Image (spheres, rainbow, N blue to C red):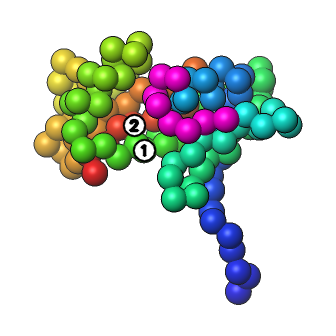
Amino acid sequence: MPEYGTPFSGLSARDVEETIAFYRDVVGLDATVDERGLGAIGLGDGHRVLVYPKGEAHEPASFTVLNLPVADVGDAVAELAAAGVAFLRYDGMPQDADGVMRGHGPDIAWFADPSGNVVSVIAQ
């Protein structure tokens, strides 16, 4: 078997600069753009998500691309909402007034990044 380095995932963006600014300035993650125009979202312990440009060809994923574990989903939702994040609502999902689904697995709430990719805050 090959010897692998630290694995990482990637997601496409309509606009890498805008998407990285969102993850850095609004969500509060360590997010940068390199000289090639590729973005990196640091997740701690050397783990990262590559953000690559697709421009107008970008189509948001139809699933959650990134789950951010938090101690208290309600608190995280309140902080992110205060920073301007709009939480998603899904038909048939028992979400409370803040968009949090409770009592059906771990507490979880979803939002979209500027490229329309779905991210969650989920109870750790």
Q: Residue at x 68, y 70 (%)?
A: 5
Q: Is residue 108 above or below residue 124?
A: above
Give residue 67's mark: 1
Q: Amino acid at mark 1?
A: Asn
**Within-10-Å neighbours for mark 2: few <14, some 14–19, many 20+:** many
11 sits to left or right of 87: right
Q: Is residue 114 visible?
A: yes
Query: Does residue 103 show up magenta in the picture?
Result: no
Kindly report the distance in space between the C-alpha atoms of the residues bearing marks 1 and 2. Answer: 5 Å
Q: Amino acid at mark 2?
A: Ser
Label 1 sits on a secondary structure element that is strand
Q: Residue at x 46, y 35 (%)?
A: 119
Instruction: Judge by depth and name the residue closer to the eye, 61 or 100.
Output: 100
Query: Does residue 31 show up magenta in the picture?
Result: yes
Give residue 120's mark: 2
Q: Are marks 1 and 2 in contact (CB under 8 Å)?
A: yes
Q: Residue at x 31, y 23 (%)?
A: 79
Instruction: Judge by depth and name the residue closer to the eye, 4 or 118.
Output: 4
Quadrant of the rendered image containing residue 2: bottom right
Quadrant occupied by the N terminus: bottom right
16 sits to left or right of 83: right
Q: Is residue 123 above or below residue 109?
A: below
Stretch of the chain drawn in magenta: 25-32
